[in-house]
């Protein structure tokens, strides 16, 4: 009977991931100042809040009105801006997809001149 309990406890430990490394989410963010065009970014942080804080801190070195228009988890994010104002952001499973969504978003606010200012991807 005692042997059965030892076997059961061992099986439960292995079955619940006791010997396997758990997959970890990686977060990133892009911060942007609409008034100055300053920006900051982050990737491969353990939480959304850590990624956003880092991106904001990097942006705020150059401007005081920074916002986080995009954060992403196990993915890529991009920021597109237009001369004279307007911006858009997007995220996707690849850099090209994130950039495409950011350009679409920017064009929705400003019909011409949008270009990618920043992109970042986590290592997943």
Image: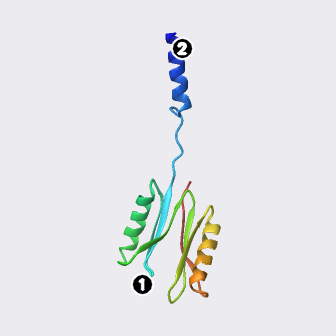
Q: Considering the image in quadrants, where does the C terminus appear? A: bottom right
Left or right: 52 with respect to 111? left
Name the mark nearer the viewer: 2 or 1.
2
Farthest residue, direction top: 1
Q: Which residue is mark 1?
A: 35
Farthest residue, direction bottom: 84
* Picture layout, residue 7 above or below residue 68: above
The residue positioned 63% from the left and 63% from the top of the image is 94
* Residue at mark 2 to residue at mark 1: CA–CA distance: 69 Å
**Residue 47 sits in quarter:** bottom left
How many neighbours does mark 2 have within 10 angstroms: few (below 14), some (14-19), or many (20 or more)? few
How many neighbours does mark 1 have within 10 angstroms: few (below 14), some (14-19), or many (20 or more)? few
The residue positioned 45% from the left and 53% from the top of the image is 46
**Residue 66 sits in quarter:** bottom left
Which label sits on residue 4?
2
Label 1 secondary element: loop
Label 2 secondary element: helix
**Mark before the other along the chain sequence, 2 or 1:** 2
Q: Depth check: 34 or 61 in front? A: 34
* Picture layout, residue 45 above or below residue 85: above
Left or right: 122 with respect to 55? right
Q: Position of residue 9 (x, y in %)?
A: 50, 22
């Amino acid at each position: 009977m005692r042997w059965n309990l030892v076997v059961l406890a061992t099986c439960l430990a292995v079955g619940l991931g006791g010997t396997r490394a758990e997959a970890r989410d990686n977060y990133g963010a892009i911060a942007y100042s609409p008034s100055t065009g300053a920006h900051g970014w982050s990737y491969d942080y353990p939480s959304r809040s850590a990624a956003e804080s880092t991106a904001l801190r990097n942006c705020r070195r150059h401007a005081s009105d920074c916002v986080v228009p995009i954060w992403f988890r196990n993915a890529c994010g991009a920021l597109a801006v237009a001369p004279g104002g307007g911006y858009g952001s997007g995220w996707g499973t690849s850099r090209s997809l994130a950039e495409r969504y950011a350009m679409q978003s920017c064009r929705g606010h400003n019909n011409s001149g949008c270009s990618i200012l920043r992109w970042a991807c986590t290592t997943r």
